[in-house]
């Protein structure tokens, strides 16, 4: 699988589109998994515009996310998932994102991991 820096978007354009919709559409077009952390309505209320042909996915993300004050994007080194999130996350949100539901971990009856 190619990295975000290598992956290219053959053609993508939005105009006066809610940022969250533009990001979902870009993710679908690029066939790239996307995670979004919402703490407020900025991604829903900020209208963005972007147009690019045969551009790196990272450049398209940079251009769209830069239009939303206080948001950024990243990708963990060992993960294909692109993450769009506020640059500063409130402690309550950080605690929520850190929750682990043991029911969705490895089956310990099969593997004593």
Image (cartoon, helix red, strand yellow):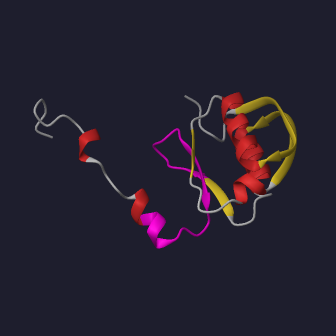
Left or right: 88, with 15 as reference point: left
Quadrant containing the C terminus is top left
**Coordinates of residue 83 in the picture (x, y in percent):** 57, 49
**Coordinates of residue 16 in the picture (x, y in percent):** 88, 46
Rendering quarter of residue 50: top right
Q: Residue at x 52, y 38 (%)?
A: 80
Q: Residue at x 66, y 58 (%)?
A: 72
Q: Residue at x 77, y 43 (%)?
A: 60
Q: Is residue 65 above or below residue 110?
A: below
Compare residues 54 and 40 and report the one nearer the observer: 40
Q: Is residue 54 above or below residue 20?
A: above
Tally of numbered tags: 0
Compare residues 82 and 95 and report the one nearer the observer: 95
Left or right: 71, with 95 as reference point: right
Q: Residue at x 75, y 32 (%)?
A: 9
Instruction: Give the magenta-colored segment's residue range.
Output: 74-94
**Coordinates of residue 2 in the picture (x, y in percent):** 59, 31
**Coordinates of residue 14 in the picture (x, y in percent):** 85, 39
Does the magenta portion include 96?
no
Does the magenta portion include 82?
yes
Compare residues 62 and 13 and report the one nearer the observer: 13
Rendering quarter of residue 22: top right
Quadrant containing the N terminus is top right
């Amino acid at each position: 699988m190619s990295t975000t820096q290598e992956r290219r978007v053959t053609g993508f354009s939005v105009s006066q589109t809610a940022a969250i919709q533009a990001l979902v559409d870009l993710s679908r077009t690029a066939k790239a998994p996307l995670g979004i952390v919402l703490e407020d309505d900025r991604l829903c209320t900020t209208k963005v515009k972007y147009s690019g042909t045969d551009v790196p996915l990272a450049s398209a993300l940079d251009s769209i996310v830069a239009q939303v004050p206080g948001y950024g994007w990243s990708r963990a080194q060992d993960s294909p998932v692109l993450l769009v999130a506020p640059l500063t996350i409130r402690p309550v949100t950080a605690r929520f994102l850190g929750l682990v539901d043991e029911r969705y971990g490895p089956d310990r009856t099969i593997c004593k991991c």
